[in-house]
Amino acid sequence: MNMSEQYDLYAEYEEFDNGRSTHRNRDRWTTKPKQNKHADNKQEEVLAMDDGITTWIPTYAQNLDPLHHERQWVINAVAHFYQENIITDVTRRVKGGKEANVYACVANPASGLEWIAAKLYRERMLRSLKNDAVYKVGRTIRDREGKQVRNSRERRAIINKSGYGQEADFMMWVGTEFRTQTLLYEAGADVPKPVAQHGHSILMEFIGDEYGAAPALNEISLARDEAGPLFQRVMENVEIMLDHHLIHGDLSAYNILYWQGDIWLIDFPQAVEARANPHAYDILERDITRVSEYFSRFGVDSNPKQLAWDLWHPYSQKEGIE
Ligand SMILES: Nc1ncnc2c1ncn2[C@@H]1O[C@H](COP(=O)(O)OP(=O)(O)OP(=O)(O)O)[C@@H](O)[C@H]1O
Ligand SMILES: [Mg+2]
């Protein structure tokens, strides 16, 4: 069974979001073993999996039923980072979603970090990317190693999303997220420091502490005196992105983390190339509108259409965009 098939198998399992319970149970770092109702008929498939490293089982996986697909999926997805001495353990699932799960990992001290967040994508996300063409316009087509694809047969396979093309397309999304985050981090934007990418997995600085991950803005209420400066800071980040020809594409209170008075923008796989994408302005305006709506609940008055235009107009003039 190859890696993609394992991901798909795992994707058959129930999805749930434990983001909120994470915050309610901040002192619980481990998950109790779960009974796996598919155990019988899936046993053979699990046994057939090549687990690669049999000696290392991260704490989070130890607490799962050995027949639970998530266990092997997590081990396979992070083993490379363990072998590369970037992480020493995976302790908990921070969030399980349709597209990716995020796990808290103990960082190898050599990385200079204490905790690392591992975002592991599921193969299944392909199915939720029906409208991804809107975001992809103007992107460089890359293969699974991240190299630019010039060969027309390969480009067609990727565009048509068949077989090899699907896998390469998937890798393009993961690669886009990592490259975008690296570029923005280096440009001084408020994004978690990217650490490594391998296969369908991305490692980055963990925002939060040993008790749990930082909440997203949608999970908290802001004090009125901090809302204004934080809105300003988000808008500065939108401007830094545009200076680098990027638009987030899914910016909202769900994709901005809050920790100790600061904000971090996350979740970049759908980032848009501002010069080449004909929908760039609409996407920018939508991002700013969603953020403005959130902050208006805490007394921040803004005119999102005007803000979007004030950013876009000088940019489009400079770049010669009509
Ligand atoms: N660097 C990080 N540090 C701490 N927590 C993080 C980090 N990155 C992501 N998370 C947690 O994981 C959640 C999901 O991350 P992200 O938005 O990148 O993935 P997603 O698959 O798009 O999820 P969703 O579909 O819910 O938006 C975040 O809301 C946050 O709770
Ligand atoms: Mg998200």
Image (tube, rainbow, N blue to C red):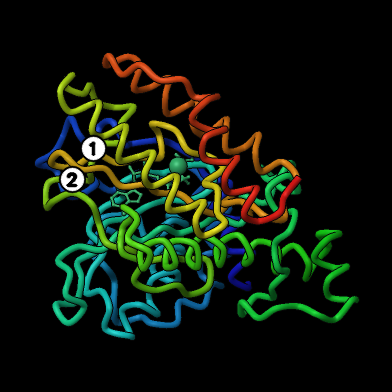
Tag of residue 87: none
> Dividing the image into 4 quarters, which one contains the N terminus?
bottom right
Q: Is residue 62 visible?
A: no
Mark 1 residue element: helix
Name the residue tied to disc 2.
212
276 or 1: nearer the eye? Answer: 276
Q: Find residue 28 and report its image quarter.
A: top left
Q: Residue at x 23, y 52 (%)?
A: 207
* Residue type at tag 1: Thr
Task: Give the Cα distance between marks 1 and 2.
Answer: 7 Å
Where disc 2 sits, the SS reads strand
Marks 1 and 2 close (CB-CB < 8 Å): yes
**Relative to 206, 168 lies left or right:** right
Image position of 252 with respect to 28: above or below: above
Within the image, what quadrant is residue 24 found in? top left
- The circle drawn on residue 22 is 1
Q: In which quarter of the image is ligand 2?
A: top left
